Image (spheres, rainbow, N blue to C red):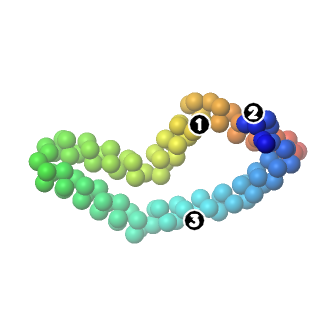
Amino acid sequence: MHEHNEMPDPEKIKEILNVVSDKIPELLKELSGVLYSPEQAKQFGLAGATFYKELKAAGMTDDQAYALTQQYMSTMSLGSAMKDFAHHHGGPHNGSGWERFKELKKLKDLDQN
């Protein structure tokens, strides 16, 4: 059984990081093409407008509807979602997962030198 405080096999780490470094850039390129296409921009704007319209129809003031629509639209942002994920899952703000990532990156960098 593998305990959580043990360091994984360096060869496995190297293999994983090599796959990640090869696949992630292409995946991000494809993802950004999907997320930031003209069609997606139109859907994003329509979603925000519809949300705002429904809040106004429910009797909210312009300021209330605007503030809630702004929050709603920010939750639909990929950048915001990634920042929140990093913050809640070991990102630069809370330590351990981020530190492990940096250690793994150092191992990969050392291996390439």
Q: Position of residue 2 (x, y in %)?
A: 78, 41
The quarter of the picture where the C terminus appears is top right
Mark 1 or 3, which is nearer the eye?
Answer: 1
Q: How many marks?
A: 3
Direction from residue 65 to residue 15 in the image, left or right = right
As helix, strand or loop, the secondary structure at mark 3 comes to helix
Q: Sequence order check: which comes first, mark 3 or mark 2?
A: 2
Please give the name of the residue rendered at 69% of the width and 60% of the height, measured from the top-left corner. 23
Q: Quick check: 29 above or below 95?
A: below
Report which residue position mark 2 lands on: 5
Q: Position of residue 42 (x, y in %)?
A: 34, 65
Observer-nearest of 58 and 108 = 58
As helix, strand or loop, the secondary structure at mark 1 comes to loop
Please give the name of the residue rendered at 69% of the width and 33% of the height, measured from the top-left corner. 99
Q: Amino acid at mark 3?
A: Glu
Q: Sequence order check: which comes first, mark 1 or mark 2?
A: 2
Is there a contact, CB below 8 Å, between mark 3 and mark 2?
Answer: no
Q: Residue furthest left?
A: 59
Please give the name of the residue rendered at 25% of the width and 42% of the height, measured from the top-left corner. 67
Is there a contact, CB below 8 Å, between mark 1 and mark 3?
Answer: no
Report which residue position mark 3 lands on: 30
Q: Sequence order check: which comes first, mark 1 or mark 3?
A: 3
Mark 3 or 2, which is nearer the eye?
Answer: 2
Q: Position of residue 48 (x, y in %)?
A: 29, 56
Please give the name of the residue rendered at 65% of the width and 63% of the height, measured from the top-left corner. 26
Q: Amino acid at mark 2?
A: Asn
Report which residue position mark 1 lands on: 91
Direction from residue 45 to residue 107 in the image, left or right = right
